[in-house]
Image (cartoon, rainbow, N blue to C red):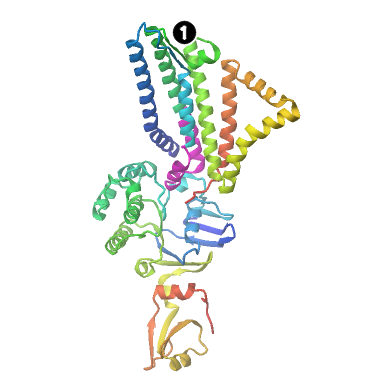
Amino acid sequence: MKLNVAVKYRLYDNKKAILIFYIVIVSVLAFMFLFSALNRGNHKFNGSIQGLELASAIFLFVVGLNSFKEIFRMFMQNGISRKTMFLSYVASTAAICIIMAFIDSILALISRSITAVNGGIYSRGVIEMMYGKQVNSIGTFLLSIILCFFINIAFTSLGFFITTLYYRMNKTQKITVSIGVPALLFVILPIADTLLLNGIFFAGLAGILTASFREPFMCMLSCFVLSGVLMALSWMLVRKAAVKD
Amino acid sequence: MNGLKVVNVSKRFGDVQALKNVSIDFNENKIYGLLGRNGAGKSTLLNIITGKIFADEGSVSLDGECIPENDRVLSKLFMMGERNYYPAGMTVVDAFRWTKEFYPGFDAERAFRLSKDFGLNIKSKIKSLSTGYSSIFRLITALCVNVPYVLLDEPVLGLDANHRDLFYRILIEQYAENPATFIISTHLIEEVSGIIEEVVIIREGEIIRNESRESLLSKYYCVSGRISDVDGYIAGKRVLASETLGGLKTAYVEGVPDINSPNLEISKMDLQKLFIQLTNSQGGITE
């Protein structure tokens, strides 16, 4: 019972942001259509829309970043346990990600028709961009939706994990992580890898990443595993989170 | 077992021991006054009871079930905290609507009526409310939520005298019509002393008194008069504290008055005076 209300609240909380996001996306597409139609045959205007669905993934990353503190306080005020709060996050994220994956796949199809209006503007969805698969059948359309869903889930989970991690940390820990992680990833590791390992570490990492995303099902599996790990870590952070004033 | 039970709860914040092995029962359908000086541990105790923060040690249960992480038990409790935990952009009317979703017993009609009585604009965003109206919004929510246990942490913070009076009247009316357990944590002891039935005094994280107001007040009395007369009277008696002003002395004595002297004035102890004497830094009985 409480889980239903908690999910309902989360969907309500995200509704406005999602609506604004799609108003912007649809406006951009409408502008592109108009622009394409007005410049039909004018080959000075070349451009491309690629991986439109990734805009949603980035948007959902930001949604994930904003999905903890305020809702946690609201739920604590209204007698919702941390467990229900977390389950409501998982359920509402799954619902939002699948709905957005569906809308994005439709929009990607629509945006492809811009090319038909003006050959100078090239448009392709994420599945075509990453794997060269054109969405020309129900099968590839469904595949596109499922792929987008898993990418969306992974991005949201990453955002949620970061926000819960920062919520639990004190000021010193926040500064340490904010400086330490980028320094480690972009300075210390590359230098150490070059000087000590002759680039083996990053070559190996690139190999793993390439293998993980080399075809749609591997990408889905990788996103699923990544999301699972991030959600498990997030739960460990949420279950002992205290309300901060 | 019915009631709210706190057993051996301790909580530390860094170097500060906020609660030390606190054990207390809050029974059904009573109004408790949770009294303590700033930093005594009142809010910490209420926050632990409602699961907002975790105790380092000990347990809290309601009607025999552990409270933390139990939605069913949490739905029997509502805490109006000092802080506002509602989203900043939410309007009062939306907050009422969502409270009704989370607590189906919430009386929205009454909430709208009380908002009118208090002059609260329900279309206002919560973040735009003044300190007083923010307290009023949370008070109305707490008064209309209809759960068996309502915890009010500094409920009249920022309220003017008229609104405070209105709140106390509404609380008494509600309690008479629909009894529930109210735990009121406040510094305005004089104002609530007529409302509360049970007094819980907390000092430096420890509960030093937990009994009915009548019983507590009947244990002490005041003796006033010239210094020599008062000193003569209190010799050998258990004295809580004394104050001297000019040539006059007032002593707060434990027990029942046993003299009727024309030179001494005997009076009843009031709750605020008793609280001050029990919780000041030199608090304690001397003989």
Residue B18 falls in image quadrant: bottom right
Q: Is residue A86 magenta?
A: yes
Taking depth in this image into account, of A120 and B166 the one nearest to the observer is A120
Q: Quadrant of the C terminus of chain B?
A: bottom right
Q: Tell which residue pokes out farthest to the top in this image.
A: A41
Quarter of the image for residue B176 reads bottom left
Q: Which residue is mark 1?
A: A137
Residue A153 vs B2, above or below: the answer is above
Q: Report the number of numbered marks.
A: 1
Under mark 1, the amino acid is Ser
- What residue range appears in magenta? A66-94
Q: Categorize mark 1 by other alpha carbons within 10 Å: few (<14), some (14-19), many (20+).
A: few
Left or right, B17 with respect to B210, comes to: right
Instruction: Report the residue that reaches farthest toward the front.
Output: A44
> What x and y, as percent, mark residue B47?
48, 54
Is residue B139 visible in the rendered structure shown here? yes
> Is residue B254 in view from this perspective?
no
Give coordinates of residue B92: x percent, y percent.
Answer: 31, 46
Q: Looking at the picture, how far across and down is residue A61, in whole percent?
A: 49, 31
User: What is the x, y in percent for residue B65?
Assistant: 51, 50
Q: Nearer the viewer, residue A31 or A194?
A: A194
Q: Label 1 lies in what chain?
A: A
User: Is the residue B105 above or below the residue A5 in the image?
Assistant: below
Judge from the rendering whether residue B18 lies leftward or rightward of residue B132; answer left or right: right
Q: Main secondary structure of the magenta part?
A: helix
Residue B251 lies, with reference to residue A182, above or below; the image says: below
Viewed as shown, does residue B104 lie left or right of A194?
left
Q: Which secondary structure, mark 1?
A: loop
